[in-house]
Amino acid sequence: MINMDHLESCNELSLPVTEKCNPISRDIDRADTKQMVQILKRCDAEIFQKKLHDDPTYQRVHSLPVIQAMMNVAKKVEMFLRDPEESLIVLSGCGTSGRIAFLLVTTFNQMLITQQHKQIYSYIIAGGDRALLTSQEAPEDNPELGARMLDKVCAGKKHVLFIGISCGISAPFVAGQLDYCLNHLDVFTPVLLGFNPVHMARSDPLQDGLFNFKEVAERMIAEQRQEKAFILNPVLGAEAISGSSRMKGGSATKIILEAILLSGHKAAFRDKIITPECVSAWITASEMVYEITYSHSDGLDALIYKAGESLRMGGHVYYVGWQTLGIIGMIDASECIPTFGADFGDVRGFVNNGFSEMKNKEGDLSSVGPEFVIGHKDFVDTILPSLSQNDMILFLFTVNDDLHEVTALANQVKRRTSNLHAIAHDLEEIIGNIFETVLNFTWPLSSDKEHNVVMRWELSTKLCLNAISTGAHVLKGKVYMNYMIDLRVTNSKLYRRAIHILQHFTGSSKTECESALLRAIYGTDDLTEEMTSADVQKHTTLAKRCDRVVPTALVMIQCGCTLAEAKHHLDSHQVIRDAITACFNSSKSMTTTDYK
């Protein structure tokens, strides 16, 4: 019989913080929706805590060295804003990090338009604009591609502040960009934002084998002494769902970069001196957003339950949002596919005015495929006619939106289904009796009107949607303990994570776990030398087209069965968690019988 506590302690020691199992959420798969909300609340609280139980020596978001580094970057932002002609501020990342970069760039460029100032912000996301709405994991592994995209964006600029975001300090795409910056410090000031100590940065060689992320980070530490580069790496604690950096990692990225950029803007346009109090005030304000959001726990757990019921009944969850809340909805929906192995149609987001509201670089992508059909008109034309009571629809809007338009669209939906709900902000009164459940957040008035209220709405909505989509997939059985057991193995990071999950639950060696994973990917019990010697990129390219890779490998190891037997075992249980539990029980029973 496997001692899970012993295995966990052995495996966890070697993992970076962002990949560890959070003890707070270890039994989230057994929790009801009320308990889930409290678990997620406690995990999100770790963003703001002064110390972590893991290691009290870790730097936190409130730690003085972190605040000082944020101030130094904010001063660079101020300098670039005061001399914008040949300057550029670039935010770059992969997956959630790239999507948050896009959202912030759009917001702060709009602020510059309001100031009648030259727009100096630009974003890069691995995989291009398609990655804003769909999982494009493979480009994350290409450091040369990252460097080339950065070089193209910055062509002709003499001064570039580059902020590379990698929650685990692990994405080769971002490492390649930071390396490029370090080799051209006459033009670039590189900033690394991540949430692991540098000694936990990814140390295996990148695709070209010339360097690794840890070496890049250590070079940045050396340059930081002369303020030629900066590292921002407070520790947030492990994610509620192990490795799911879309949650705390995404929220902290938004909070920290907003604090920096807002401080720079206030200094440039209002002559406000950048102080520790100025920078930390936004973190404190964000903590208030967290507290107010989770004070609506009853409504939040009702929405988790409704979303979970829809997914369990074979229905769908649709986010229908306005302005940036619509974008927040689409970001959350896009993350469900790689995180939970969800189908494209399971959770989808729509925004008013489609791509014209997005303001993305590549413009309207609706002709690329159904994943990019995102406007409200598209929702009415393609989704509304086939809505059923099993489908959950969640409206996302604020007092700033056209409430007549909101009401008209809600009434159209209401004629098809009563499973209609809303997250709203600062409404003086609820719109009639249209919505079954409404979370209406009321926010304290702010003396500072520089987009601060909108940013609060965005963070609150992100926290809600992360909780809803995570809780719904937990209820559907896509999570085992607090591991994303059915993740898509689409890049090297997820390939390594899959092997760790297999080791964690079986106690088998890395070699045995990788072999089982490859059997599931290649669809055979007899691996050839060509298969086993192929590089990880080939493995992940094939894995993209495969379903239930990790669960299949897990069942094969635990039951000592063939690939066909493992698939049959999974097919006989709708919920993956149940199949794995039955497999564990079967294995224990066989062991007991053999012993007798």
Image: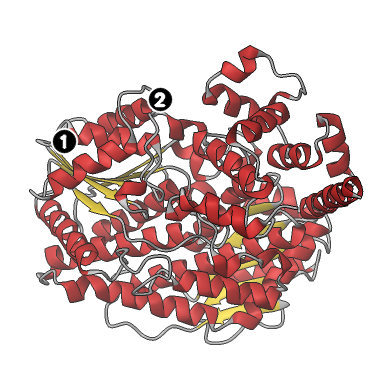
Report if residue 396 is visible in the image: no
Q: Which quarter of the figure has residue 262?
A: bottom left
Can you say whether 275 is above or below 238 in the image?
below
Q: Nearer the viewer, residue 282 or 436?
A: 282
Give the side of residue 125 with respect to residue 551, left or right. left
Which of the 4 image quadrants contains residue 433?
Answer: bottom right
Which of these two is toward me, 45 or 442?
A: 45
Residue sitting at x 64%, y 30%: 543
| Residue 465 x %, y % | 58, 64
Q: Amino acid at mark 1?
A: Lys
- Find disc 2 in the rendering and name its residue: 207
Identify the residue at horizontal 27%, vertical 78% (top origin): 448
The reply to whether residue 11 is visible in this rendering is yes
Q: Position of residue 450 (x, y in %)?
A: 28, 70
Q: SS class of the residue under badge 1?
A: loop
Instruction: Determine the image quadrant of residue 110.
Output: bottom left
* Dots 1, 2 in contact, CB < 8 A: no
In the rendered image, residue 355, in percent from the top left (x then y), is placed at: 50, 46
Q: Nearer the viewer, residue 174 or 134?
A: 174
Query: Is 140 rendered above or below residue 300?
Result: above
Comparing labels 1 and 2, the label whose residue is closer to the camera = 2
Bin the neighbour count of mark 1 within 10 Å (Cα to Cα): few under 14, some 14-19, many 20 and up.
some
Disc 1 and disc 2: Cα gap in Å? 28 Å
Q: Position of residue 371 (x, y in %)?
A: 62, 41
The one of 575 and 102 positioned closer to us in this rendering: 575
Q: Which residue is mark 1?
A: 157
Residue 149's place in the image compared with 269, above or below, is above
